[in-house]
Each structure stands twice: as C-alpha cells, then as structure tokens.
Image (cartoon, rainbow, N blue to C red):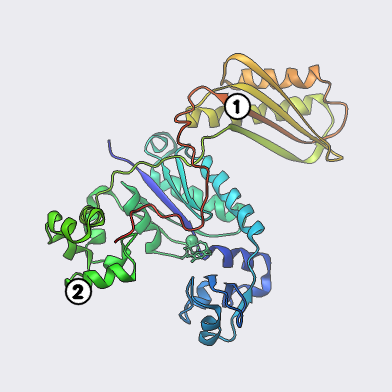
Amino acid sequence: MQRKIIHLDMDAFFAAVEQRDNPELQGKPVVVGGMPGSRGVVATASYEARIFGIRSAMPTTLAYKLCPDAIFVIPRFEAYKKASNQVFEILSRYSSEIETMSLDEAYLDVSEVSLEVGSATEIAKKIRAEIFNETGLTASAGVAPNKLIAKIASDFKKPDGLTVVPPERVSDFITEMSVRKIPGVGPVMEEKLLALRISKIKHIRELEPRDLIELFGKFGSYLSRASFGIDDREVSSSRERKSLGAEDTFTEDLRDIEDIKRELYVIAKRVSERLEKQKIQGKTLTLKITYSDFRKVTRSRTFDHELSTTDELFEQAFSLLLEHELFHQKIRLLGISISSFKSEKDPVKNHNQITQLSFPFPISP
Ligand code: TTP
Ligand code: MG
C-alpha cells in the first residue's frame, strides 16, 4: 500500500515563540541561547538573524560578531514546551499515528485518515492553519509517500511553506539536491563524499550499493536507498493515546438545564466524530466541569462495552451530571472524554521521550 506521510517542523521555533510573546522582537534578528561573552551557544535564531549567517550550535560570541544588533534572549523552556504540547494536540486531531522527533517536529501517517477527511495535502493545509490560528506560530510541512521525502519536503520552502511530493515526483524532486539534504549527512560525511566526486544526490545513484556498503557500512546502504527516495520505515506513534475528548468554554456561563443539555449534546457529537475519525472506541466516559468560580469536578464511569454514538455519549454524560447534581452552579466549561480504549495498538512501542535532537538514522562511522 502507498503511504501518505506528513512531516511537520516549526519555523525558528524558540525564536518564533519569543517574537510572538514580545512584539518588540518581531521582524528583528533574535538569537535564543547563551549570552554573548558567556561560553554559551545559539539554540536557534530568527530568520532575520540567519541572514547574517547565525546558526544553531554556533558560539553566541561569534553570533554577536556577525550581528551586534541582534537581540539575545535566554531560553524559556516552559514556554516552548507549552507551545509544543499545543501543536501536538492539534496533530492528534488528524491521526493517531504520530511520531514526535523533538519539541518542534513530528511525522504523521495519514494514509487511512486522508481517505475520509480529504487528501493528505488538505490535511496538511488544515494543520498549518490550525497551528497558526491557535498558537500564532508557523510550521512548514512536507507531504510525501515516505518519511525521508516528507522530511526533505518540509525543509524545502521554509519558513511557512508547504511542499507536496507525489510518488511519481520523488525521484526528480531530490535528484539535483546536495547530498547534505539527506538526513544524517553532515559536514564530515559530505567531505568524504566530495572526495569521491559525489556532491549531488544523483551522483550517489551512479554507485553500486555494494560499493557504498563497502565504503560506509550500514550508512552506505541507507545512502543508496535514500538516493532513490526509498524509505519504508513506519511512523511509530511516540505515545499511545490515553484519552480522546472535546470541551467548550462558554462566553456566558450556563445555568439553565436546557442550555447545559444542548451544549453537552454538541460536545458529545464532536467526541463521537473524533472517535470515528481515529477509529477508536473506549469504555470509560469522563465528564468534566469547571464552574464560574473556576472550581473543577470530573466524574467518570466505566461501561462493559465501548461507547461511540453521539446519543450514547450524550445520555451517559448527562446522566452523570444529574446523578451527581453537578448543575447547581453556573458552568463555565463542559467536557467529555473517552478512555480505556479497545485497540491500544502497540503498548510496547511507548517511547514517550521527546528528546531535543534525537536522530533517526545510524550515524556514519
Ligand atoms: P530546528 O527545527 O532544527 O530549528 P528551528 O525550528 O529553530 O528552525 P527551522 O526549523 O525553521 O530551521 O530545532 C527546533 C528547536 O530546537 C530550535 O528552535 C531550538 C532547538 N535547538 C537547539 O536548542 N539546539 C540546536 O542545535 C538545534 C538544531 C535546535
Ligand atoms: Mg524547526
């Protein structure tokens, strides 16, 4: 089966969060990292700062020499973590097959989803729009038949770009690119390849895989396959989903039971649509309420069967509300979520770790 993969990567992530939160930084060269004069390095730089040649991992002192007018900012990891969580929550609306690579980067397998929700391209457009609307940050995305090409594609029109590479365009898309575009090929590997007169991806294709393997071992075999755009790694969900739900905060607090009923039905409908979209069902329903004084309550019930229809979700949520007499105060927020899923796909694959610079490929010798 032909896969449909989206790779998403936030633009100048840490710097973009800083610019969003401090209007004085907008449109200006911003460097996030250690302070100049210290022995710190650059975590990232805004695109305005990159014009001066400033890059991640460069000593901040050098960044200062390249652009003394740049604004240097100490990282605020809490803010980045929060934005990252928001972004991953948006992704989870579209697929349960999400592999997070770092705080700002993830792969989604939308092969199945795209059949119903629209094309993979359509999904990527929606995701980018939702990220921008809900976080004020931009993401670049690549849509392709595999992870390798999706990753190269997301980088192709950075920042704020979308690149779609259909299967029949894969080979042409990468052929003239520098070998450096292959994830895992850094400056050292590039030198080694240049010594063999290999500078572009198409040059790798001219070598026999067996010669590449002799030269570079496992990495040689990876290079050979990558040069043809071949990659059959699966998107392995970084985190098995524990619950799925929907909630609403109301512009005016709810008091009337008929209003509560109506809103609860709308929420139940959203939850059932999401369950349907993600093809999951669960036995535990949780009702969540925040009152006008911000006091929160949750009530759960586990059934002997999976719940999925709007009517059932609504009726069970509403009966929880009645039984526990949760309607005696003005309600600010209502939410319903479902957990205890039937098909926890592969609970063993639970690498919940989001590492800063995790790397999917064997590093060259
Ligand atoms: P990247 O996605 O590599 O970079 P970026 O998002 O800043 O810029 P773009 O994707 O548009 O090229 O890394 C994501 C964040 O990870 C980055 O904002 C800061 C952090 N980071 C480091 O702290 N050190 C590093 O060496 C790198 C590469 C990134
Ligand atoms: Mg990024």
Answer with left or right where residue 122 lies relative to residue 176: right
Q: Earlier in the sequence, mark 2 or mark 1?
A: 2
Q: Position of residue 244 (x, y in %)?
A: 59, 32
Q: Position of residue 47 (x, y in %)?
A: 50, 72
Badge 2: residue crowd in 10 Å (few <14, some 14–19, many ≥20): few
- State the image quarter where residue 193 is shown: bottom left
Q: Amino acid at mark 2?
A: Ala
Identify the residue at horizontal 77%, vertical 32% (top origin): 289
In contact (CB < 8 Å): disc 2 and disc 1: no
Answer with left or right where residue 262 lies relative to residue 349: right
Answer with left or right where residue 238 lies relative to residue 191: right
In terms of secondary structure, where does tag 1 sit?
A: strand
In front of the other: 203 or 291: 203
Q: Which residue is mark 2?
A: 195
Mark 2–mark 1 Cα distance, whole angstroms, equals 56 Å
Residue 199 visible in the picture: no
- Name above or below for residue 297 compared with residue 140: above
Q: Position of residue 11 (x, y in %)?
A: 50, 63
Q: Quadrant of the N terminus?
A: top left
Identify the residue at horizontal 78%, vertical 24% (top origin): 258
Residue 162 visible in the picture: yes
Badge 1: residue crowd in 10 Å (few <14, some 14–19, many ≥20): many
Q: Which residue is mark 1?
A: 339
- State the image quarter where residue 24 is shown: bottom right
Disc nearest the viewer among 2 and 1: 2
Picture disc at residue 125: none
Q: Amino acid at mark 1?
A: Ser
Q: Position of residue 247 (x, y in %)?
A: 68, 36
